[in-house]
C-alpha cells in the first residue's frame, strides 16, 4: 500500500511504474487531477465571484478524469464545485487532512 504522500506525488507527476497504483483493495489509474480550492480564490472567497471559481475548477478537472478536491475553502464552494463536476468527472474524491480520501461519487464502470 502506498503512503498518502506518495499518492499525492504520483497524482502530480503522472503514472507510476505499470500505470497503476494500489490503494487498499482498489486499483486506480493515474494521473488524478488535484484541485486545491484555496488556489481558486486566494485570501477570501467571494460569493459574487462564484462563476469564475467554477470555470477555473472545470478547466482544471477536464472531462472524464478522476478528480480530487482539497485545500481550505468554504463549504458552499466545495458543494458548488462538486455539483458542477458531476457529469464531468469520472470519479470525485474529497481529500481531508483528518479523514483521508472520501469518495463523493464514482461513475467508473471498472
Image (cartoon, helix red, strand yellow):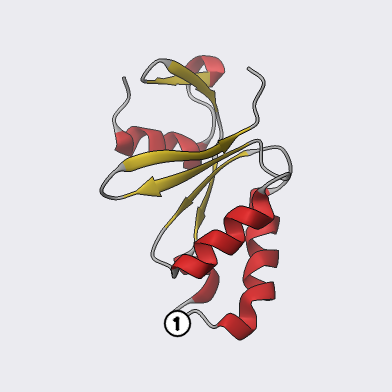
The answer to which of 13 and 52 lies nearer the viewer is 52
Q: Residues within 10 Å of mark 1 (few under 14, many from 20)?
A: few
> Residue placed at 32% from the left, 41% from the top?
100
Residue at image coords 49%, 79%? 45
In the image, taking residue 106 as reference, residue 23 lies left or right, namely: left
Which quarter of the rendering shows the N terminus? top left
x and y, in percent, of residue 75 in the image: 45, 66
Q: In x, y percent, where is residue 97?
A: 29, 50
**Who's the residue at 38% across and 65% down the image?**
72
Asked if residue 92 is positioned above or below residue 38 in the image, the reply reads above
Q: Secondary structure at mark 1?
A: loop
* Residue 56 image-quadrant placement: bottom right
Q: How many numbered markers are drawn?
A: 1
Residue 42 position in % (x across, y down): 47, 77
Up/down of 16 relative to 52, above or below = above
Left or right, residue 89 beside residue 41 = right
The extreme left residue here reads: 98
**In the shown orientation, is residue 4 left or right of residue 105?**
left
> Is residue 1 or residue 51 the one in the foreground?
51
Question: What's the residue at 63%, 81% (across, down)?
Answer: 49
**Image quarter in which the C terminus is found:** top right
29 w.r.t. 70: above or below: above
Task: Please name the residue that numbered disc 1 is placed on.
Answer: 44
Amino acid at each position: 500500500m502506498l503512503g498518502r504522500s506518495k499518492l499525492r506525488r504520483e497524482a502530480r507527476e503522472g503514472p507510476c511504474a505499470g500505470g497503476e497504483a494500489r490503494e487498499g483493495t482498489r486499483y486506480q489509474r493515474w494521473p488524478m487531477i488535484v484541485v486545491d480550492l484555496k488556489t481558486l480564490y486566494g485570501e477570501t472567497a467571494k460569493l459574487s465571484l462564484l462563476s469564475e471559481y467554477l470555470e477555473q475548477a472545470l478547466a482544471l478537472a477536464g472531462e472524464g478524469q478522476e478528480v480530487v478536491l482539497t485545500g481550505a475553502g468554504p463549504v458552499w464552494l466545495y458543494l458548488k464545485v462538486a455539483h458542477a463536476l458531476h457529469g464531468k468527472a469520472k470519479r470525485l474524491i474529497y481529500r481531508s487532512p483528518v479523514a483521508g480520501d472520501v469518495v463523493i461519487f464514482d461513475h467508473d464502470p471498472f
